[in-house]
Amino acid sequence: MSNIAIFGGTFNPFHIGHYQMLNAICELDFIDKVFVMPDKIPPHKEFDNVVDDLHRKNMCQIVCDDFSKAQLCLIEFEREGKSYSIDTVKLLKEKHPNDKFYFVIGGDMLSSLDSWYNWQELIKLVPFIAFKREGLLSFDEDHNRLSAYGADIKVVNAKIDDISSTQLRQKIDKNLLPEKVYNYIIQKGIYNV
């Protein structure tokens, strides 16, 4: 049996903040593997200005190669429609019945967790690993509110740079990207670089 963290996102692009989160997850003693999982069609975001799926998958793979615990998971590309977290978790549990999954969530997303599709069922199916972001005043309140509903939330205090993917796409900054990802973006000429 393995303890597997689900680290999902649009990863458009995979920036240094994502990299810092992945590093912090890999350093958790109770986590054996991390599934880095690019979204196919995220339900909570406008899906315009997203680079080709192949590029997002490749950026994730480039980063996974830096971490022995990390592996690319493309389960959300195996089905049609929006990528609801509840459906992904159910599918993973079905495919890996002997493993325990943890769902990674940023502190900013914690505040909206109770607006997600079928969130009440989701919090029963999987514990969460939540990153407490500096300056996010509502984190403790959100944590307490969701815990009262029965959510199992393990809090990680790690220094994660707050980076806007939207702004980064408009102006690619070498300092805000893992070096290999930056080189890939330049080489492929994505994001109009």
Image (spheres, rainbow, N blue to C red):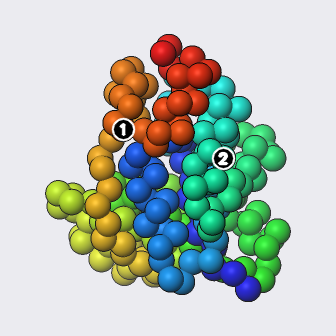
Q: Quadrant of residue 153?
A: bottom left
Query: Residue 124 lies in what quarter of the image?
Result: bottom right
- Give the structural element (helix, strand or loop) at label 1: helix
Residue extending furthest top?
192
Residue at the disc numbered 1: 176
Determine whether 151 is above or below 109 in the image: below
**Which residue shows up at 53% across the image and 22% down it?**
186
Residue 193, position as x, y percentages in the image = 48, 15
Residue at the image point whose x is 46% and y is 52% from the top: 19
Circle 1: is it few (<14), some (14-19), or many (20+) Cα within 10 Å? some
Would residue 127 appear left or right of 110 to someone viewing this image?
right
- Closer to the camera in the image, 153 or 147: 153
Examine the rendered structure and indicate whether residue 36 appears above or below residue 150: above
**Quarter-wise, where is residue 80 in the image?**
top right
* Residue at image coords 45%, 50%: 18
Q: CA–CA distance between discs 2 and 1? A: 18 Å
Measured as percent of width and height from the top left, residue 23 is found at 46, 62
Which residue is pictured at 79% across the width and 73% down the height? 96
Q: Which quadrant of the figure contains the N terminus? A: bottom right
> Relative to residue 135, is residue 174 depicted above or below?
above
Q: How many marks?
A: 2
The answer to which of marks 2 and 1 sits earlier in the sequence is 2
User: Which residue bears the numbered disc 2?
Assistant: 61
**Left or right: where does residue 172 sit relative to residue 88?**
left
Query: What amino acid does circle 1 point to?
Result: Leu
- SS state under label 2: helix
Q: Residues within 10 Å of mark 2 (few under 14, many from 20)?
A: some
Q: Is residue 114 above or below residue 33?
A: above
**Closer to us: 14 or 152:** 14
Q: Nearer the viewer, residue 89 or 7?
A: 7
On the picture, is 75 further left or further right than 166? right
